Amino acid sequence: MLAERKSLVIGEAEAAEMIRDGMTIAIGGFINSSHPMALVRQIIRRGIKNLTLVGAASGGLDLDLLIAAGCVRKLVTTYMGGEHYCPVAPFFRVAAQRGELEIFECDEGMFYCAMRAAAQGLPSTPWKAGIGTSFPEINSEIKVYNDPISGEPVLAIPAITPELAIIYAAHSDAYGNVQHVGTGFGDRAMWRAAKKTIAQVERVLPNEEIRKDPRATSLYGVDAVVRAPYGSHPFAGPGYYIEDGAHIREYVAAGNAYAKTGDRNPFEDYLRKYVRDPKTHEDYLEVIGIRRLISLHEY
Amino acid sequence: MSSADYTTKELLATFISHQVRDGERVAVGAGLHVPRAGILLAHLLRCPNVRLYVTMTFTNLTKEPRMEPFYTVYDIRPAKWAEAYVLHDDFQEDPRLVSDTFVVGALQIDKFGNSNLIGVGKDYKHLTFRGPGAVGTLSMAHYVDRYYLFVQSHDKRIFVDKCDFISTVGWGEGGPAGRQKLGIPGKGPVYCITPLCVMDFEEKSKRMRLKSVHPGVTVQQVIDNTGFDLTVPSDVPQTVGPTEEELRTLRERIDVEGMLRR
């Protein structure tokens, strides 16, 4: 009998069981695109606490939702907003102002240094941009030292190693060969840095489809694959749908009500309707409704 | 169409378009409509050979009769124009291949053009206003040839004597060696562009200096809304507005949805 290659496809509940209190978790995507939201909503339903969230390099309202739901202790990102939907993410703003959230303050260049150091097993990697700024003062984990070759001052950016990365992509086969549509933003850097990676995808393709274009394989080997169509909603899923602007505005309005008046009720309504009451990703899609989903086409 | 009928945003887009040089690499930040329109205006009228970095792709749009809307840096739709993808983490591997110039926004800007996107307040742990964060601004501003500061309002909350925090270095503590002393390459901030005026940096002190005021704005109005002693030359001209060709190109090929006319 021939040895048989093992499928890595698992369900969303099984994937969520890999996430525990206090872990360091990288979340892929970029601002309002490509976040593994089926898994993010599972984290909230399971009441996971004290997470250190790493990225995306430019974060988004996916991270803000996790902060709002009380899952986050520390945040590693360079930007917390939603571009024209929202200049500063509301729950992030309040938590940061109250000193309730630990922040690894950095910019995109520094963020990728931290990922690269982790991937290469280095304690830190140097970065030049940032000398003369406030970053070494407000982020005690970043150190200034003199480069031993030139004597010039440079920043040492520490390695940040996610125990798990959860990444959204368009496609994978059952064996964890992941293909993004579009650039994949900084997802590869987080995959390289993390000890394990779960890819949440729109479609699980036959292995033959992957072999038609191996150059398109962006992550060559993840540890588990979760199939969740429309799984980045309300954010964009490149190749499948654009972001749901009306839904994002609904979230931002609930967040702003809290940030401006302290009234958490609109957000609690949002959380109940879209996260707590639907128990699975399929339940969530039924709440959003087929008409809304189909209207989010890319053409 | 009379060129006297342009809006301030169209004026600013035109000014920004004049800063682009043909043949260079130019990052188009999609979220700021005015700089985005300005860079595309330069590309369509004067700079057919720029390498445009648009929503994580490199492209050339000279043959596009009109731009379809894209307002965010993550929008996949402009990828139909792509000649190359730019993987976001490559930004760290080869930052000089991304762009020769950049536009930096800010919550605060000081007299030497240092800027702050982190937050406002004296205590970092208890800010009075937490900003969005630095994004890629400080690394981009470090590696590009030159950059431009751009803000959408002009008041004493933004233009301060000293930033509470510095996320992007302008001229540091001032002087023509202000950047060199910190080991920072590049020509730094060239202009600071606001809804009231354009400012540059005086050569010896590298302090901010009024360069031109927009039509309908007085020099006193700029001084009254700036929280530091602005250097004001004896002769302050008016910012030059768009030509009819520039305005027509903006409205018919770039800003087809009229974002700059609102």
Image (cartoon, grey):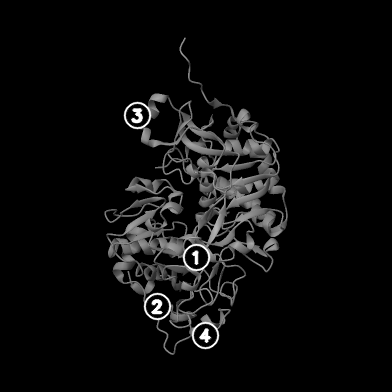
* Label 2 in the same subunit as label 1: no
Dot 3: chain letter: A
Identify residue for label 3: A212
* Label 2 in the same subunit as label 3: no
Q: Secondary structure at mark 1?
A: loop
Identify residue for label 4: B220
On screen, residue B89 above or below A2: below
Mark 2 → mark 1, Cα distance in angstroms: 41 Å
Q: What crowding class fits label 4: few (fewer than 14 Cα within 10 Å), some (14-19), or many (20 or more)?
A: few
Instruction: Give percent across and percent down for residue A186.
Output: 48, 46
Dot 1: chain letter: A
Nearest to the observer: residue B230 or residue B122: B122
Nearest to the observer: residue B205 or residue B154: B205
User: For the view shown, which residue lies furthest in the top direction?
Assistant: A1
* Label 1 in the same subunit as label 3: yes
In the picture, measured across the screen, residue A220 lies left or right of residue A131, that is left
* Label 4 in the same subunit as label 2: yes
Q: Are marks 1 and 3 in contact (CB under 8 Å)?
A: no
Identify residue for label 2: B239
